[in-house]
Image (cartoon, rainbow, N blue to C red):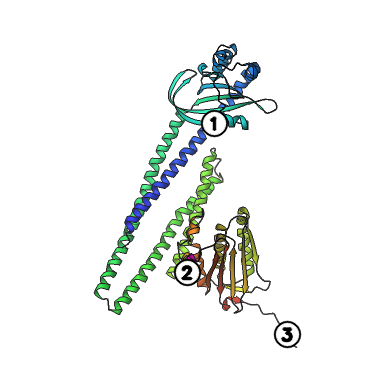
């Protein structure tokens, strides 16, 4: 027997742990990147002040006159002069060390005099800064460092190379500033700790709620299983018992569909609030948000909420179909206009990806008798599915015509990745996808085709798939003749 509770406990626990770790790692890395960028901006400003004070007096010395050996450099009056200006400008700042390099990497000056005469030309960060004529920084943990004001231990240091540009834009020298970011790193570590604790509590609560729901479902399934097993064992040859067992199974399936429908309704209310509030935040209705990162997070929340709402709506529609509660509001539909409207809705998305989207239909295409909302849902599901699995440069065609039997035939053909023959029937089941689809970054949930098939069958139609791996897929919908409404021309009245 399938051990639902055990597998759920393991799978959901691992999934929540993985999501939590990813969130913590992403937040920590983003915070460290922001810290480095902030320190680099401060160092750029300080390097300009140093250049304004030092370069007019010592430019020729640094570029051409400075000796190439450390002892000679340490004995020069220019080194003492540069050191005096440097210490004066860095007083009270988090800068713990300053170096001044010649363009070829020679350390002409260092606040730690013992480092004069060394060469940084082999440092890839130094080389990149000189080559691109722009600042370059990195953060590292220094066990010990000789700073301007003495030795420091176990410090988080942001090292920035800051090129000095001449009048024609060429690099004439490079400052290297070491900034102490230990306090900033400690603050980030504290925030990461708080985030980790918060995620543990939040995911723990979510896990507990889901565990209770799944436990009840598991108990219900086990009870049904054992009841069925006992009945089959006791009354194997009883036809009436087999009929009752079938009825129980159908009732359980209906209960499952009703449960999904009710749960979807319950989830939509708080989800709509999340979408609404996040939209208010992204539009800054009540004032600007100073930190752009928070504004970006609000946009991510809004987009994820809309995606989740779309998924819930698909689950709700599918559960309605399975429970027999889906109603069709039949109207006369201008099929050509409906296709043009759906093509227009998807055209911008196709253009962004670089996919051509075209229509193919005759001028005398008849009207369609059906539910306009569900018909458009069918078109949009098929077009969206084709967009997901068609590479840039491909094409998608939405076509329709009246077949020889008088019915309506609608087809969506793409030049995407295609589907293996063994998977054609399986992917029409809910939550099923072909193996190649799983490798796609936006493969979805596997509900789109199943829901489209159900909506097509509610209109009396049939859905079929043809595909060639690597060449594309065609989804064909065949509707019976009673769905086609051909307008008869009016005859003149006789006299």
| Label 2, label 1: how far apart the Cα atoms are | 60 Å
Instruction: Determine whether 180 is above or below 361 in the image.
Output: above
| Label 1, label 3: how far apart the Cα atoms are | 89 Å
Q: Nearer the viewer, mark 2 or mark 1?
A: 1
Residue for badge 3: 493
Residue for badge 2: 326
User: For residue 420: magenta?
Assistant: yes
Q: Secondary structure at mark 1?
A: strand
* Residue at the image position 54 percent from the left and 60 percent from the top: 385
Q: Nearer the viewer, mark 3 or mark 2?
A: 2
The quarter of the picture where residue 54 lies is: top right
Residue for badge 1: 137
Mark closest to the chain's N terminus, 1 or 3: 1
Q: Residue 402, position in %: x, y? A: 62, 75
Crowd around label 3: few <14 · some 14–19 · many ≥20 (10 Å)? few
Q: Which residues are magenta?
A: 417-425
Image quadrant in which the C terminus is located:
bottom right
User: For residue 73: magenta?
Assistant: no
Frontmost residue, 369 versus 104: 104
Asked whether, in this view, residue 470 is left or right of residue 194, the answer is: right
Prevailing secondary structure of the magenta residues: loop
| Label 3, label 2: how far apart the Cα atoms are | 45 Å
Instruction: Determine whether 370 is above or below 287 in the image.
Output: below
Q: Residue 114, position in %: x, y? A: 50, 17
Mark closest to the chain's N terminus, 3 or 2: 2
């Amino acid at each position: 027997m399938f051990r639902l509770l055990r597998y759920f406990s393991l799978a959901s626990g691992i999934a929540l742990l993985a999501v939590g770790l990813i969130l913590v790692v992403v937040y920590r890395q983003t915070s460290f990147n922001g810290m480095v960028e902030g320190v680099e901006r401060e160092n750029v400003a300080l390097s300009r002040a140093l250049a304004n004070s030092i370069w007019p007096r010592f430019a020729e010395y640094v570029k051409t006159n400075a000796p190439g050996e450390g002892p000679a450099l340490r004995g020069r009056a220019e080194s003492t002069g540069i050191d005096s200006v440097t210490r004066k400008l860095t007083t009270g700042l988090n800068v713990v060390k300053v170096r001044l390099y010649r363009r070829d990497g020679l350390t002409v000056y260092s606040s730690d005099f013992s480092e004069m005469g060394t060469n940084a030309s082999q440092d890839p960060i130094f080389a990149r800064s000189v080559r691109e004529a722009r600042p370059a920084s990195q953060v590292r943990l220094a066990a010990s460092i000789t700073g301007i004001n003495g030795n420091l231990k176990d410090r988080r240091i942001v090292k920035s190379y800051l090129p000095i540009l001449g009048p024609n834009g060429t690099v004439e020298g490079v400052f290297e500033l070491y900034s102490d970011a230990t306090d900033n790193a400690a603050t980030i570590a504290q925030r990461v700790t708080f985030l980790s604790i918060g995620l543990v509590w939040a995911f723990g609560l979510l896990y507990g709620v889901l565990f209770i729901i799944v436990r009840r479902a598991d108990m219900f399934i086990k009870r049904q299983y054992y009841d069925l097993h006992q009945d089959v064992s006791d009354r194997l040859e009883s036809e009436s018992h087999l009929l009752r067992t079938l009825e129980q199974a159908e009732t359980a399936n209906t209960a499952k569909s009703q449960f999904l429908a009710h749960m979807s309704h319950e989830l939509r209310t708080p989800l709509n609030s999340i979408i609404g509030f996040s939209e208010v935040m992204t539009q800054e209705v009540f004032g600007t948000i100073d930190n752009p990162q928070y504004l970006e997070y609000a946009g991510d929340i809004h987009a994820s909420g809309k995606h989740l709402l779309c998924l819930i709506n698909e689950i709700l529609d599918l559960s309605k179909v399975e429970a027999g509660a889906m109603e069709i509001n039949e109207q006369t539909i201008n099929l050509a206009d409906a296709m043009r409207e759906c093509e227009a809705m998807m055209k911008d998305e196709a253009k962004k990806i670089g996919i051509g989207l075209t229509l193919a239909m005759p001028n005398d295409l008849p009207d369609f008798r059906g539910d306009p909302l569900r018909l458009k849902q069918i078109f949009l599901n098929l077009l969206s599915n084709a967009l997901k699995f068609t590479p840039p440069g491909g094409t998608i065609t939405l076509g329709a015509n009246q077949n020889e039997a008088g019915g309506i035939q609608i087809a969506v053909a793409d030049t995407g990745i295609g589907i293996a023959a063994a998977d054609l029937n399986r992917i029409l089941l809910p939550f099923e996808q072909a193996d190649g689809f799983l490798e796609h970054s936006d493969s979805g949930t596997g509900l789109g085709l199943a829901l489209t098939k159900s909506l097509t069958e509610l209109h009396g139609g049939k859905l079929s798939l043809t595909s060639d791996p690597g060449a594309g897929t065609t989804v064909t919908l065949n509707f019976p003749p009673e769905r086609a409404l051909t307008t008869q021309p009016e005859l003149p009245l006789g006299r």
